[in-house]
Image (cartoon, grey):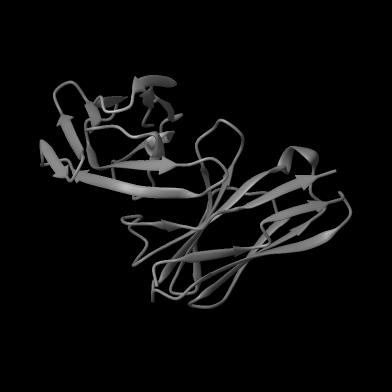
Amino acid sequence: DTEVTQTPKHLVMGMTNKKSLKCEQHMGHRAMYWYKQKAKKPPELMFVYSYEKLSINESVPSRFSPECPNSSLLNLHLHALQPEDSALYLCASSQDESFREQYFGPGTRLTVT
Amino acid sequence: GEDVEQSLFLSVREGDSSVINCTYTDSSSTYLYWYKQEPGAGLQLLTYIFSNMDMKQDQRLTVLLNKKDKHLSLRIADTQTGDSAIYFCAVVSGGSYIPTFGRGTSLIVHP
């Protein structure tokens, strides 16, 4: 199984809502990543978890809160987002945090109204 | 920091070869990646090359690295309509593992 799954596929939320994005992999990978991708732009790294510990936070605003409950699951908790946070949120995983051979999920398309 | 440049569009006929180019600025690059992104999908790693290699071939894909000119290319032989997608070049350099992405090249394949 070389798949990374993400739910939901689409999410519309208001600026006062709290929601969560979920990512799952069963490849035994020990590193998991969150990226944000705006239309017609490359993905931007947000967070890296290695062995279930947060190892990189690319100065992401605190309204985005990552969580890694176990080695297969990665969540991104969202609270008080702004319309400019609307984007495609991609999860990825790799054997370790060297970024080599990352497998990406299909993404969650987030719209903040 | 690293700067990675790609042309934004490439249009080819089905059956022709496509060559997507990428230039970068940091000569201490270590790993160089090519990703493919189809509409509405995540990124798919196509191939990567170490900086001590000049060429890597994988079926229809050929990667060429010119370290002197800091130029990376991806050649797709016998391009098919299913190859239509955005192709991102990404470079890792210096002491960091974090890749710097180019803006992506949109490949359009005409029948």
Q: Looking at this rendering, what residue extends furthest in the bottom direction?
A: A70
Q: Residue at x 51, y 42 (%)?
A: A43
Q: Which residue is at the front of the view, B45 or A48?
A: B45
Q: Is residue A32 above or below residue B32?
A: below
Residue at x 39% of width, y 19% of height: B11
Q: In this view, does A32 lie to the left or right of A67?
A: left
Q: In this view, does B103 lie to the left or right of A95?
A: right
In the image, residue A32 lies at what x, y percent?
A: 47, 64
Q: Position of residue A2 (x, y in %)?
A: 39, 67
Nearest the eye: A40 or A15: A40
**Nearest to the observer: residue B76 or residue A88:** B76
Relative to the observer, which residue lies in front, B5 or A56?
B5
Tell me if I can see residue A8 in this picture. yes
**Quadrant of the rendering where the C terminus of chain B is positioned:** top left
Question: Can you say whether A10 is above or below A5 in the image?
Answer: above
Q: Position of residue A6 (x, y in %)?
A: 59, 63
With respect to residue A87, does B86 lie above or below?
Answer: above
Q: In this view, does B28 lie above or below B6?
A: below
Q: Residue at x 28, y 41 (%)?
A: B94
Q: Quadrant of residue B101?
A: top left
